[in-house]
Image (cartoon, helix red, strand yellow):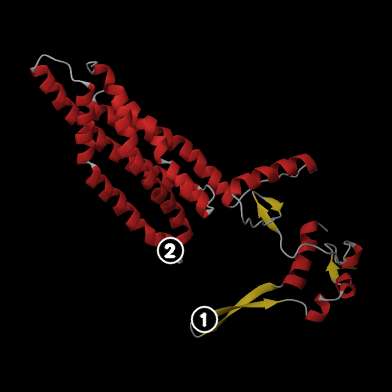
């Protein structure tokens, strides 16, 4: 006898075999035949199951197989055609990335896997790593596009460097609010900072445009008199240019903050993700306001001083 014949007998006796089908109106049910429960629950009776060989000999199942009870897993899970087991971990009070890195270090130092075994980290950590890989590609491309657009707008690299150099200051408010709310870094937080950077750059561009317009007027007035503009002219130009942008900047910042505050008090499905997107923008808009009204005019003055006549 071969193994297939033996497996066929035990699968039919214990698991059953579909021998037909019954039709009940529009419903169809298979007809399954197998040994009674008293046979299937008894090791002795299973050992005495009859087998018929090719030459007609009648033997017991115990003559060709060892039948016994053994403890095993209630369910066998496989992945990539390999049995696997899952260990679920719930994290509270800290970020996912640092916990997994520490756990990986401990496992690497204290666990020796036998041959044929492997270990993998999945779940939200796997999704986070996948998203981080995409962000490492998307963020530099985005910054490059922003630099190109800024250069096409101003036609000078100096304005581009001013905006990009002062841009990290706009992120300070978002970082402080994240610390106050005890939010850990996540993909949602990263998306919030990317959105904040876009709004901060937009406000900074508008401020520089008005500063340049006011300064160009002072330069034109001075050139008509065959003189160079003075430090006082530069200060007046900055005051006029920045003063024209106070109300529009305040309206932009307040609109963003007022529009996002209801998200911070939400409690429905997806509110946790939305809060982590909104928090960097709310805190960052406050620091972006100070950046636009205070830092950029100050940097602009330091930059244009060399074009002024010393008095």
Q: CA distance from mark 1 to mark 2?
A: 52 Å
Identify whether 206 is placed above or below 120: above
Q: Give percent across and percent down for residue 6.
A: 80, 62
In the picture provided, is 140 more to the left or to the right than 211? right
Q: Please, which residue is most extreme toward the front here?
A: 311
Q: Give percent across and percent down for residue 203.
A: 29, 40
- Front residue of 45/184: it is 184
Name the image quarter holding the C terminus.
Answer: top left
Element at label 2: loop
In the picture provided, is 136 more to the left or to the right than 215? right
Sequence-first tag of 1 and 2: 1
In the picture provided, is 132 more to the left or to the right than 195? right
Residue in view at x 29 percent, y 28 percent: 300
**Badge 2 local density, few (<14 within 10 Å), some, or many (20+)?**
few
Q: Give percent across and percent down for residue 172.
A: 44, 41
Identify whether 223 is placed above or below 89: above
**Is residue 45 in sight in this rendering?**
yes
Name the image quarter holding the N terminus.
Answer: bottom right
- Front residue of 252/34: it is 252
Residue in view at x 48 percent, y 46 percent: 176
Identify whether 267 is placed above or below 25: above
Residue in view at x 70 percent, y 53 percent: 84
Residue in view at x 74 percent, y 76 percent: 34
In the picture provided, is 93 more to the left or to the right than 157? right
- Front residue of 86/256: it is 256
Q: Give percent across and percent down for residue 109.
A: 77, 39
Which residue is label 1 attached to? 27
Which residue is label 2 attached to? 265
Element at label 1: strand
Q: Please, which residue is most extreme toward the left here?
A: 224
């Amino acid at each position: 006898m071969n193994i297939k014949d033996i497996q066929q007998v035990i699968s039919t006796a214990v698991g059953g075999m579909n021998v037909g089908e019954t039709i009940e109106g529009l419903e169809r049910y298979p007809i399954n035949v197998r040994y009674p429960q008293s046979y299937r629950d008894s090791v002795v009776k299973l050992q005495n199951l009859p087998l018929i060989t090719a030459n007609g000999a009648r033997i017991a199942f115990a003559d060709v197989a060892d039948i016994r009870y053994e403890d095993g897993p209630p369910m066998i899970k496989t992945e990539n055609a390999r049995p696997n087991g899952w260990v679920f971990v719930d994290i509270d009070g800290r970020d996912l990335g640092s916990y997994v890195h520490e756990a990986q270090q401990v496992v690497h130092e204290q666990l020796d896997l036998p041959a044929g075994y492997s270990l993998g980290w999945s779940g939200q950590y796997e999704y986070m790593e996948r998203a981080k890989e995409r962000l490492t590609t998307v963020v530099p491309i985005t910054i490059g596009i922003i630099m190109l657009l800024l250069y096409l707008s101003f036609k000078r690299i100096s304005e581009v460097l001013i905006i990009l150099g002062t841009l990290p200051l706009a992120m300070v408010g978002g970082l402080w609010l994240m610390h106050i709310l005890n939010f850990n870094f996540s993909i949602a937080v990263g998306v919030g900072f990317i959105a904040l950077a876009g709004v901060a750059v937009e406000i900074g561009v508008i401020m520089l445009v008005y500063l340049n317009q006011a300064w160009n007027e002072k330069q034109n007035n001075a050139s008509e008199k065959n003189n160079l503009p003075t430090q006082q002219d530069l200060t007046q130009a900055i005051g006029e240019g920045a003063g024209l942008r106070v109300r529009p900047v305040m309206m932009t910042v307040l609109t963003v903050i007022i529009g996002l505050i209801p998200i911070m008090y939400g409690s429905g499905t997806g509110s946790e993700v939305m809060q982590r997107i909104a928090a960097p923008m709310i805190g960052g808009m406050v620091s972006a306001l100070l950046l636009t009204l205070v830092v950029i005019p100050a940097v602009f003055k330091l930059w244009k001083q060399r074009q002024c006549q010393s008095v």
